[in-house]
Image (cartoon, rainbow, N blue to C red):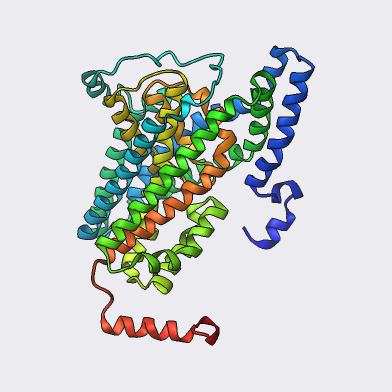
Amino acid sequence: MSHTQAKSRPWWQRIPLYLQIVIALPFAALLGLWLGSINANPDLVKHLAIPCDLVLKALRALATPLILLAVVHSFLTTNIPGRAGRRLATLLLTNTLAAICIGLLVANILQPGKWGQIAKPDSTATGVNKTFDPWVLLQDMVPEAILKPLVDNNVIQLILVALTFGIVLRAIKAEQVEHGKTDYRGIEQVVTILFEAIIRILHWVIALVPIAVFGIVARTVALQGFEPFKALGAFIIAVLLALFLQACYYISRVTLGSWVNPKRFLQGGSDALLTAFSTASSTVTMPVTFEALIEKIGLRESSASLGALVGSNFNNDGTALYEAMSALFVAQILNISLSLPQQLIVVLTSIFASVGAAGIPEAGLVTMTLVFTAVGLPTQYIALLVTVDWFLDRCRTAINVMGDMTVSALLDGKQRKTEVEMAVFEEQEDSDFHPTDV
């Protein structure tokens, strides 16, 4: 959006989303305290959650087409060399698995859902107490109809359909490009337009999040006081600890698997990390990350491109960690013990849900509904997470970008650039040198 277009928007639309939420929180708390002091009718107070319920319904509706189109779009439009592509896929998968395992480990040890009392929602999902049967899961992977996963929000079936169409369409595209045909461009353009349409609708829904936060906070304070926010405070601490451990994991991998030292890695990528935290968007941060990897850290352009531009479409480690921890947090609130196989389902769904999470603020809330549904948790509890997601979204976006930087450094290997490349790079550094830098 250009500067002129931004100025033409109404003043309230020019206020950043996070600032709108920060402004809404104290007013919502004051309203909730006032309603509680006058013993307002509970049935009327519950109506304050209607905007939040509508936002959650919209997010559930957008979740399945978003993941389907995101996976197919990535397969169709991403250009990955064969050998480098296999190594990139391995790095992305191991990083995401590490993130989810760290998140589940911290959530199992700290158990933030036990730190405060939160009343159960008015209605819960019928499958909360369902038992896990791997054979039933295996039989259920193949849908009865192609569109059925979209209607039922069945994430396992959706993943299978998305991967099947993505792989097949990519193979057809490769064959047509080899023979000089362009028939694939039609479907590629359709998928791209549909994906952009979903993202635009998602922007509309996310614009209503401050209203949803205001309503759910006011209702919670009026009916339950501040007791529920003790558990949310513990959840914030647990997520921040897990994200910090993931950052330590990244630095360890960079130190052991590349020529880049930790100091150079953090100093060179500081602009990208700060941009990610301030914008809560990995997509907006992408050009900053790419520039920092090449000009400040000194990686090869090919490595920076694969990690920061290609890998960012698939690499959302912070989002996967957060969604896995959210599922375990809600299970602890409900006193439900998720078995190891059920936590493996959380791992699987979090991996693919993170791929479908668009690089825009609050997008993780969309795909979280699929993670909850996969293990039968009530999605109503996402309403409470909305109140703190504006802050945690910024933290996990910074981790997502740090993951992109890590992948780029690992792809660059343990050998620095060639002497010719390094001479050019050092000459650029010398041109930027000032006496005040000493």
Q: Identify the residue shown where x is 31% and y is 65%.
A: 303
Number of numbered labels in the structure image: 0
Q: Residue 101 at x, y = what percent? A: 32, 39
> With 409 as the anchor, is 318 left or right in this view?
right
Quadrant location of the N terminus in the rendered image: bottom right
- Vertical position of residue 259 compared to residue 226: above or below: below
Q: Judge by depth and name the residue closer to the eye, 233 or 201.
A: 233
Q: Position of residue 357 (x, y in %)?
A: 44, 42
Q: Residue at x 46, y 59 (%)?
A: 286
Q: Quadrant of residue 159?
A: top left
- Report the residue at 64% width, 33% height from top: 213
Q: Nearer the viewer, residue 367 or 162?
A: 367
As drawn, 269 above or below 383:
below
Quarter of the view holding residue 169: top left
Whole-percent x, y for residue 130 in the image? 34, 14
In this rendered view, identify the residue nearer to me: 275 or 158.
275
Residue 354, position in %: x, y? 40, 41
User: Quick check: can you spot residue 316?
Assistant: no
The quarter of the picture where residue 34 lies is top right
Asked if residue 91 shows in the view, the reply is yes
Q: Is residue 402 above or below residue 423?
A: above
